[in-house]
Image: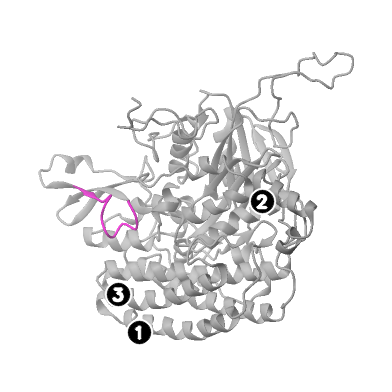
Amino acid sequence: MTYEGVPGLVETKEAYGETTLILDPARLREASFHLRDEEGFNVLADLAATDYLGWPQSKEQVAGYKGSAAGRNINAPGSWGLARLPDPRATRFCVNYHLLAIPDGRRVRVQVWVEDGDPVQSVVNVWPTADWHEREAWDMMGISFEGHPNLVRILMDDDWEGHPLRKDYPIGGEPVRFSGEE
Amino acid sequence: MTIAPGKPEIYRGTRIPSPIPTVLQLDQSLREDDDILQVNFGPNHPSTHGVLRLIVDLDGENVVSLAAVVGYLHTGFEKNMEQKTWWKAITYPERIDYVSFQNNELAFVLAIEKLLGVEIPPKASWMRMLLCELNRVHSHLVWLATGALELGAISMFWYCFRERERILDLFELCCGTRMHTRYFQAGGLAEDIPRGFFPECRAFTERMPGAVDEYETILNRNAIWLERTKGLGLLSAADALALGQSGPVLRASGVDWDLRKNQPYLAYDEVDFRVPVYYNGDVYDRYRVHMVEMRESTRIVAQALDRLEGMFGEPWIVDDRRFVLPPRHELHTSMESLIHHFKIVTEGYRVPEGEVYVPTESPRGEFGCYVVSSGGPKPWRVKFRAPSFVALEATATCMSDALVADLIAIVGSLDTVMGEVDR
């Protein structure tokens, strides 16, 4: 099964028996309609956002991740360990859409990579189930979805500050009320 | 939708509210009416299966608008798991859904094993399947008990919890704890199956079909039960798929889809069982699916017992010291094993880089686990696809022209556990 016809397809990767399609974020909605209507992916099983801030290796084991951590390449020959690693800044966020085709059972993962603050096109009008999933991604990761009808926090309080699942959000970092440390 | 050919449509077109698919909005013409009463249903209401808040507008007894508010049980499991080594993180998924703990644990353990590329011994595979099916019966019993209790059938609660106790006793016998067993280890099981488990479990499988008969005797011809479940909370196959439903909710809407059958994992392709499918998409059909699944799960347990009894003495965990603790007796004689044990316990084992999504059929539907590993001793990112979270999205669609009294039956029938919704 090839996905050559998907609009905005950047790359296809196979790993652990799973197919990953990396798409151009600007054509996500168009590609979603294509995947639903032409390829038969009628169920959006899951939507998962990942923060790759501080990703340790320069290897590209994860589909779509391009770039490497900032730092010195101590193994570069002839540089006495002073060579800078190339491309220190990588795209930070990855939004994964796990699609499922019922009844034939095909699965595919669709990925788009975005920077902090870049909006992703909402797919609520393609798969209505994306409503809460996108709200969760906004709440937990701070990824905004363009065209979502009701993009408000879902798991945290409405007045919560920050997005807890980001890598730069400390664990246990919320202020404890009446603790004497205020 | 050609998924159930020859069956009449549950309703024409779509009932998913627009523009927000999960919020039933109040009609503008009704808004000026003085008689609209806004009610906060929950978050602390005995029949909300946790802390769910529904903001409902009532016109007399009719529900005219509905919005579900979740998040009261959010405890940051996914964030916490990023701070724990892989083998410590296994304890977290169980606590997400405290009714189907073993099925959740399984999804995460399978994801680790997929990244490690390890084949587990058949004994572990069959025992996992046995426990997951017992857990499915347990989960359905809790669903039936509380669902019937909410509709006034209090005796169901006592009958169901009688059998539930026996299942929890089996878990205790096998794993030492009644809930949150943490019996699955990456590579197999944490311990061998104890003596005495098989006869106890066999006695349970012989008892259970009769117990389901009893439940059906109470409910199947009970006029109140039928009146309060039939034709309520309708969800068509097309709407169910658009809303991403899975598990019993999807099967009650006429879609023959069960991951155990369609995308088998563990040893589900080697056992004989039937997937119940009903076509009316109402609360009653969801009840029927649960009842048949309890019988079928009991059959799977019996078949797994037949197989496991012949596996006495076989290994229960793979012998791969990259991530499996050395056996206890070696620690007393071998310094190397002691060091190795210490390293795995303190530092944790490393899992190769990559990302996987492992879907499993939990009692509530597709429980998926998306894991990203950076090659280190801790997961980089864990995301659970919680079937309850998705099931709650269907409340607004199911609730079109419902009465306030049906609201409890409908929300109950979607079989949500708030711990899993909020994670």
Q: Is residue B47 magenta?
A: yes
The part of the image, by quadrant, that contains residue A149 is top left
The residue tagged 3 is: B226
Both labels 3 and 2 in a single chain: yes
The residue tagged 1 is: B217
Closer to the camera, A144 or B255?
A144
Closer to the camera, B231 or A177?
A177
Closer to the camera, B76 or B408?
B76
What is the chain identity of the residue bearing mark 2? B
> Measuring 56% from the left and 67% from the top, which residue is drawn there?
B175
* Amino acid of disc 3: Leu
Inter-mark Cα distance, 1 to 3: 13 Å
Q: Is residue B329 magenta?
A: no
Q: Which tag, 3 or 2, sits closer to the chain's start?
A: 2
The reply to whether callout 3 and callout 2 are in contact (CB within 8 Å) is no
* Amino acid of disc 2: Ile
